[in-house]
Image: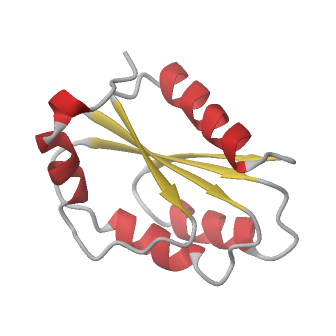
Amino acid sequence: MTKVAFGITCKNSSLTIKYVLSLLLMQEGIFERLFIIVDGGSSDDTLKIVQEILSKSNVQYIVESGSYTIPEGRNKILDIALKENCDYVLFVDADVVFRFRNLVDMMLSFASDLVKTR
């Protein structure tokens, strides 16, 4: 089965992260999901919200916290995705809300234009 990592970098995103996670959890399709959240040192409730939402879901998730910049966070996401044998990584900013429920299917339809992790 195809394994897709949703890689989210965030910092002080408590106002938006719940919407982003909720909409990504509603993505349709037959694929294994891994949520990789890399936090850049939030001082608000971002990490608490992430834990509350993802712990109630039926998906695998990994949360890293530190003083990551966005580029460092994305590199960390790629490192984790490779270790977890993900086929694809979809980077999502913590304030981007998707209205499509078939985002992964749309992404995979362009698979020849994508860079695979393996």
The residue located at (54%, 20%) in the rendering is 83
Residue 38 on image: x %, y %: 67, 49
The residue located at (72%, 71%) in the rendering is 46
Q: Nearer the viewer, residue 2 or 12?
A: 12
Answer left or right for 83 relative to 76: left
Q: Nearer the viewer, residue 106 or 27?
A: 106
Residue 107 on image: x %, y %: 22, 47
Q: Is residue 1 visible?
A: no
Answer left or right for 30 relative to 115: left
The residue located at (18%, 61%) in the rendering is 102
Q: Is residue 19 visible?
A: yes
Quadrant for the C terminus in the image: top left
Answer left or right for 37 relative to 104: right
The residue located at (57%, 66%) in the rendering is 94
Most extreme residue toward the left is 109
Q: Name the image quarter holding residue 113.
A: top left
In the rendered view, tell whether residue 56 sits above or below residue 6: below
In the rendered view, tell whether residue 55 sits above or below residue 74: below
